[in-house]
């Protein structure tokens, strides 16, 4: 993969880079694309440490499952009101679309991946690390009324598999669904850094609010990488940075990468 142009932006006074999704999700020779296949619905946003976030779009997803804390999935919502967490929303068609008949709409999986050096630094503290990850991914990122599925189903399957149609018939790829893995591999090729999955947050919606939902998810992706940049700058001063944001524009894999042997910009 050739180097990909990226544009610098500010979010909450933190510099981030937007790598065009159209470049990272190009159809390559031999690939067969179907209308029902998931796709990259946003650009890929990165901070100076290389933590990246993006939106995976899923047309006509699997029915949203009922998920119990610590026990995993227990079948889909049926729409009879008995298994709904808040019966008071029954009169709100947009809210109902987050839970009932979700295969008629679309799903968005807000995805966060990071270089191995970053994930290693975060996981060194088994108590603080998970809390820091959750704080960065959830604090002031997306509105709570999007009803993202935030419970981690680590004992069963990655969160994105809850939304992908037919996912149970596939072989898992190192805990990452094949669509996310494609973006991860192409980002690795562009930056030369190994990436791992940090978190996934699926949500289900009606197509009537597609634009509004996507805008909110994109802001959430930007906020997430800005949060990680702030926290890593304070808590993990020894964590190497991937990008030098001194220029007005950067090219991933070239200008953006720090000079060889240099761990942090001066």
Image (tube, rainbow, N blue to C red):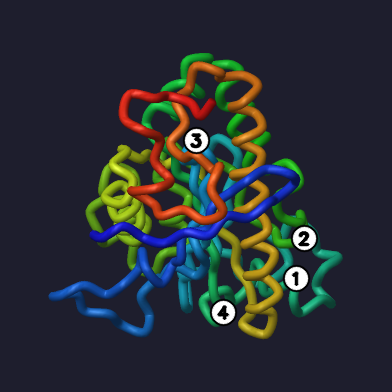
| Secondary element type, mark 3 | loop
Q: Residue 233 vs residue 39: left or right? A: right
Q: Which residue is mark 1?
A: 95
In percent of the image, x 51 and y 29: which residue is there?
A: 265
Q: Earlier in the sequence, mark 4 or mark 1?
A: 1
Q: Residue 222 vs residue 142: left or right? A: left
Vertical position of residue 36 compared to residue 163: above or below? below
Q: Which residue is mark 4?
A: 105
Can the viewer see residue 45 in this picture?
yes
In percent of the image, x 41 and y 62: which residue is there?
A: 5
Q: Earlier in the sequence, mark 3 or mark 1?
A: 3
Residue 145's disc is 2
> Which class describes the residues within 10 Å of circle 2: few (<14), some (14-19), or many (20+)?
few
Marks 1 and 2 close (CB-CB < 8 Å): yes
| Secondary element type, mark 1 | helix
| Secondary element type, mark 2 | helix
Give the Cα distance between marks 3 and 1. Answer: 36 Å
Q: Earlier in the sequence, mark 3 or mark 4?
A: 3
Marks 4 and 2 close (CB-CB < 8 Å): no
Give the Cα distance between marks 3 and 2. Answer: 30 Å
Q: Earlier in the sequence, mark 1 or mark 2?
A: 1
Q: Which residue is mark 3?
A: 49
């Amino acid at each position: 993969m050739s180097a990909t142009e990226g544009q610098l932006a500010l979010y909450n006074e933190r510099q981030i880079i937007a790598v065009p999704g159209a470049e990272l999700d190009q159809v390559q020779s031999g690939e067969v694309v179907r209308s029902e296949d998931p796709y990259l619905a946003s650009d890929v946003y990165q901070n100076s440490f290389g933590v990246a976030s993006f939106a995976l779009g899923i047309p006509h997803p699997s029915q949203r499952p009922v998920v119990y804390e610590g026990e995993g999935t227990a079948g889909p919502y049926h729409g009879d009101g008995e298994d709904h967490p808040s019966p008071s929303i029954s009169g709100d068609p947009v809210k109902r679309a987050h839970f009932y008949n979700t295969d008629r709409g679309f799903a968005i999986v807000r995805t966060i991946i990071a270089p191995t050096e970053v994930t290693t630094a975060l996981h060194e503290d088994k108590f603080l690390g998970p809390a820091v990850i959750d704080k960065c991914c959830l604090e002031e990122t997306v509105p709570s009324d999007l009803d993202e599925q935030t419970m981690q189903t680590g004992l069963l399957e990655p969160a994105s598999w809850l939304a992908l149609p037919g996912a149970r018939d596939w072989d898992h790829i190192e805990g990452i669904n094949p669509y996310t893995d494609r973006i991860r591999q192409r980002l690795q090729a562009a930056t030369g850094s190994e990436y791992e999955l940090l978190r996934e947050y699926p949500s289900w919606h009606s197509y009537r609010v597609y634009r509004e939902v996507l805008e909110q998810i994109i802001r959430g992706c930007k906020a997430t990488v800005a949060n990680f940049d702030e926290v890593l700058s304070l808590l993990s001063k020894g964590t190497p940075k991937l990008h030098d944001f001194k220029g007005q524009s950067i090219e991933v894999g070239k200008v953006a990468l720090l000079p060889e042997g240099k761990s942090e910009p001066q």
